[in-house]
Structures are given as structure tokens and as C-alpha cells.
């Protein structure tokens, strides 16, 4: 945390107070996310009597912690890029910090409300709805129009992933259960656990369910933890731009950025078109700023946010070129663009560890409400060993695939849909009242989180003048 200590030394007390509140809200979102989503992993192991509740949630909490540490950061910036372009360019503005606080406050509020009623909703949906809300509100208040405050292309990618994943969860879990019935004809697997609470399933079933519980927890930590990382970085960039606008601790950061900028300049010059001249001029300015520097720390503090903005502007324009060019031409821009983004798209290790701790600790508390809904109230009969394993395997695989292709998905939706799919395949029946409440909550999550974040942002803007 040396970088944080250096950045806050001599900070104005009022700004330091805002920073403390903003970080508390951001890390608090991860705690709430943890206990809201615990049921995704532990419901099956608790209700099949594989593990008792306390060791189950502790095991899940440790796996969530490890998932955050091992998951990388690509999804963090997939979520961040949903935010308005002017926020990403000028994260040091009051409006930018207010947007992040508004969307985090709205997300925490909706998660706590649905948790209180024991309704399993998606923290991903909540967060993304809140992002869209502040984006739309910012577009209106800035006078640029309702549709200008959101990166709609990225929003479309994320929305598609969130819409398809529960369908995959339902269908794949149902299919897996039917396959298991055909190839593993053990009656114990397809009957509710015995009434005796001390009666445990066979060791190999327990091992399978513990493995899937751990896998879902790891995948959840990897996917959901990154969302909080990106938003915490925006708080740090907004309030401490000199310390966090660029990756000051990257070894040879300036050398790497300069090499990437030179490769991009060469690639654009070889196209022989004057249409690329503004980007070549921008690259010349970036190269001039990096000249003679081996570390990004050598960039003057007042110039760091300007360099970050220039790099972001350039990357957005190069992305437009990539869509217009033939695939073999666009490839020459991909590698240097990724290398150049490393100067701004990074997460300090203390942020990763802080998010991991918050998500892990959050996973170990407050789990009872939603666990009961997932395990007892979705289907009309008790969850069987095979149903629990099928739903968990599908959730683990779906979220793992989403992590691999850097797309955010809802662990809650995938697992809840998987449980419902196994109930349908087993002909156990689904409780209509619970299904109605869950679907209604899913449908309301987007508009409610959007309206809440937009209202908080507008109110804050008016209060700040």
C-alpha cells in the first residue's frame, strides 16, 4: 500500500474524507455481494448434508478469496468500459467521482433489499443497471442527449451474456441430470436425503459436491471480484489522479508504452492515408511526453491524468479503425494497443487483496435467507444429490467459460436456473410463487438500479452546483 500512502500524504482533509467514504462504499459493495451470493455455492452442499452450514460457508469464503486473487483483471475493465466516455477520460472530475459513488450506493441498496426478502437476484445485473443509470443521467445533464452517456456496444455484449447464461444454466443442468439418470442408475442419487440429519451421502458424492462447491466459489470470486476492482480504481483515479492515473510501479512501464506507441505509429504510417494523421500526431505527442523516461513515475504529476486521457482517446479511435478495416490489416494494431493499455488498465495488488478479503468475509455471513430460497422454495421437493451436483457443475463451467472470454455473467441466475432445470427434468415441479418472485425481481433489477443510481447522481450534481 506504499502507493496509497504516498498519494494521500498532504491531501486536503475534506478530500481525504471523501476518499475514505468512497473506498468504504466500494469495498462494502463487495462484502454485500459476498453474502448476497453465498447461496450460489453452498445451498447444494448444505441441503444434501454434504457439509454443515458453518464449514460450508467458510470453505466457500476461502475459495471466493482465492478466486479473486487468481482471476486477473480483464473483466474489471469490461465492466468499467460501460461507463460514460467522459468519465473514463476525466476520472479526476467531481462528476466522475459522484457517478461512481451513485452507482455503488444504488447497487448496495438493491442487493440489501432483495437479500432481506430472500430473493436471489444478480449482483451483476444490479451493478450494470446502476452504471447505465448514471450514464443516461449524465448524458441528459450534460446536454449531449439521453443515449450518449453509455457505451452501447459494450452494453450489448454484456447484456447478451447476462441474458443467455440463465438459459444455458436451465437447459444444461436439466440435460446433465437426464444423462446422469441414464448412465449412473443409483437410486440414492435421485431421492431426497434421509430425514436423519446425521445421515450423510456416500463419500464419492460428498467429494463431487464439495468439488463443485469450491469450483463455483472460485469462479464467482474471479468473475464478481473483478467488477469491484474496476470501480475502486475509478475512485482512486478520480480522487488521487497523480498516484493512480498511470501504473507507476510497472517495471519498464515507460519503455513498454513508448515501444507500443512507436509500433502503432509505424502501422498507421504504412497505410499511407491522411485519414490516420490525427492519430499519428497524437502518438507523436505521447512519444514526446515519454522521451527519456524509463518509468511512468518520471512523468510529471500534473501530466499523468492528461497522458491517461490521451491514451484512452487514442485507443477508442483505433478501435473504430479496427472495425472498418479488413481482419488482416487490423491485426497489426491489436498487440501494440493491448501493450499500451497496460499503462492505464491495471489494479494494484493491495486492491486485489482488499476485494478478496471483503468478498471472502462477506461470503461467510448472512447466507441463510437466500440459501433457504434456492434449496427449499424453487422446487416442490427436497434437492437431491444429483440435482445439486448437476446445477453446480453447470454453474462452475458456465462462469469459468465467461471468465475465459472476459464477460461478466450472473452466478445467481446461472445457479438458480440450473436448480429449476433439474427440478423440471426430475419432474419434481417448480414452486410458481417463488419462480414468479424471482423472475419479477430479475425484471425489476435493471430499472430499479438504473433509477436509483440516476436519482442519486442527479441529486448530487444539483447539490454540488
Image (cartoon, rainbow, N blue to C red):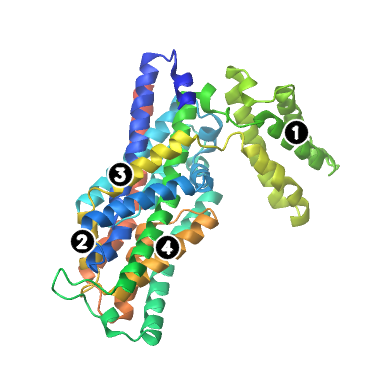
Q: CA distance from mark 4 to mark 2?
A: 21 Å
> Is residue 432 shown above or below 346?
below
The reply, left or right, for residue 200 in relation to residue 9 is left
The reply, left or right, for residue 293 in relation to residue 375 is right
Residue 165, by quadrant, is bottom left
Q: Identify the mark nearer the N-term, 2 or 1.
A: 1
What's the mark number on residue 456? none
Judging depth in this view, the residue of 142 and 331 nearest the camera is 331
Q: Identify the mark nearer the N-term, 3 or 1.
A: 1
Residue 131, by quadrant, is top left
> Residue 208's x, y, as percent?
36, 69
> Residue 367's x, y, as percent?
24, 53
Disc 2 to disc 1: CB gap under 8 Å: no
Q: Residue at x 20, y 55 (%)?
A: 368
> Callout 2 environment at 10 Å: few (<14), some (14 to 19), or many (20+)?
some
Q: CA distance from mark 2 to mark 1?
A: 59 Å
Judging depth in this view, the residue of 193 and 450 nearest the camera is 193
> Residue 384's x, y, as percent?
26, 75
Q: Residue at x 13, y 72 (%)?
A: 196
Q: CA distance from mark 2 to mark 3?
A: 20 Å
What's the mark number on residue 361? 3
Identify residue for label 1: 278
The reply, left or right, for residue 257 in relation to residue 230 is right
Q: Identify the mark nearer the N-term, 4 or 1.
A: 1
Q: CA distance from mark 3 to mark 1?
A: 49 Å
Which mark lies nearer to you, 4 or 1? Answer: 4
Asked whether residue 452 appears in the rendered view, the answer is no
Q: Secondary structure at mark 2?
A: helix
Amino acid at each position: 500500500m506504499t502507493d496509497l500512502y504516498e498519494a494521500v500524504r498532504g491531501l486536503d482533509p475534506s478530500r481525504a474524507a471523501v476518499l475514505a467514504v468512497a473506498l468504504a462504499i466500494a469495498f462494502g459493495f463487495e462484502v454485500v455481494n459476498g453474502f448476497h451470493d453465498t447461496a450460489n455455492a453452498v445451498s447444494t452442499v448444505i441441503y444434501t448434508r454434504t457439509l454443515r452450514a458453518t464449514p460450508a460457508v467458510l470453505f466457500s469464503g476461502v475459495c471466493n478469496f482465492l478466486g479473486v486473487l487468481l482471476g486477473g483483471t480483464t473483466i474489471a475493465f469490461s465492466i468499467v468500459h460501460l461507463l460514460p466516455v467522459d468519465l473514463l477520460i476525466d476520472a479526476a472530475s467531481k462528476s466522475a467521482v459522484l457517478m461512481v459513488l451513485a452507482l455503488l450506493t444504488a447497487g448496495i441498496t438493491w442487493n440489501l433489499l432483495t437479500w432481506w426478502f430472500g430473493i436471489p437476484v444478480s449482483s451483476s445485473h444490479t451493478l450494470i443497471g446502476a452504471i447505465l443509470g448514471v450514464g443516461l443521467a449524465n448524458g441528459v445533464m450534460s446536454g449531449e442527449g439521453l443515449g450518449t452517456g453509455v457505451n452501447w456496444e459494450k452494453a450489448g455484449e454484456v447484456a447478451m451474456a447476462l441474458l443467455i447464461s440463465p438459459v444455458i444454466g436451465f437447459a444444461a443442468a436439466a440435460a446433465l441430470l437426464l444423462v446422469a439418470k441414464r448412465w449412473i442408475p443409483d437410486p440414492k442419487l435421485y431421492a431426497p436425503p434421509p430425514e436423519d440429519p446425521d445421515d450423510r451421502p456416500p463419500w464419492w458424492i460428498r467429494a463431487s459436491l464439495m468439488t463443485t462447491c469450491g469450483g463455483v466459489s472460485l469462479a464467482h470470486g474471479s468473475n464478481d471480484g473483478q467488477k469491484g476492482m474496476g470501480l475502486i480504481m475509478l475512485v482512486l483515479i478520480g480522487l488521487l489522479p497523480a498516484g493512480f492515473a498511470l501504473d507507476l510501479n510497472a517495471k519498464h512501464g515507460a519503455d513498454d508504452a513508448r515501444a507500443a506507441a512507436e509500433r502503432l505509429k509505424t502501422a498507421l504510417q504504412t497505410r499511407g492515408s491522411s485519414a490516420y494523421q490525427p492519430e499519428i500526431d497524437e502518438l507523436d505527442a505521447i512519444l514526446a511526453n515519454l522521451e527519456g523516461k524509463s518509468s511512468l513515475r518520471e512523468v510529471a504529476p500534473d501530466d499523468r491524468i492528461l497522458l491517461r486521457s490521451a491514451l484512452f482517446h487514442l485507443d477508442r479511435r483505433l478501435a473504430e479503425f479496427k472495425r472498418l478495416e479488413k481482419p488482416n490489416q487490423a491485426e497489426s494494431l491489436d498487440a501494440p494497443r493491448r501493450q499500451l493499455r497496460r499503462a492505464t488498465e491495471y489494479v494494484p495488488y493491495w486492491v486485489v487483496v482488499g476485494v478478496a478479503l471483503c468478498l471472502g468475509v462477506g461470503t461467510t455471513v448472512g447466507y441463510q435467507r437466500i440459501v433457504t430460497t434456492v434449496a427449499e422454495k424453487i422446487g416442490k421437493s427436497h434437492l437431491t444429490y444429483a440435482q445439486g451436483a448437476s446445477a453446480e457443475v453447470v454453474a462452475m463451467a458456465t462462469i469459468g467459460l465467461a471468465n475465459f472470454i472476459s464477460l461478466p455473467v450472473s452466478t445467481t441466475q446461472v445457479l438458480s436456473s440450473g436448480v429449476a432445470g433439474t427440478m423440471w427434468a426430475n419432474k419434481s415441479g417448480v414452486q410458481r410463487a417463488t419462480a414468479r418472485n424471482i423472475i419479477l425481481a430479475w425484471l425489476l433489477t435493471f430499472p430499479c438500479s438504473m433509477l436509483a443510481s440516476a436519482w442519486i447522481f442527479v441529486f448530487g450534481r444539483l447539490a454540488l452546483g
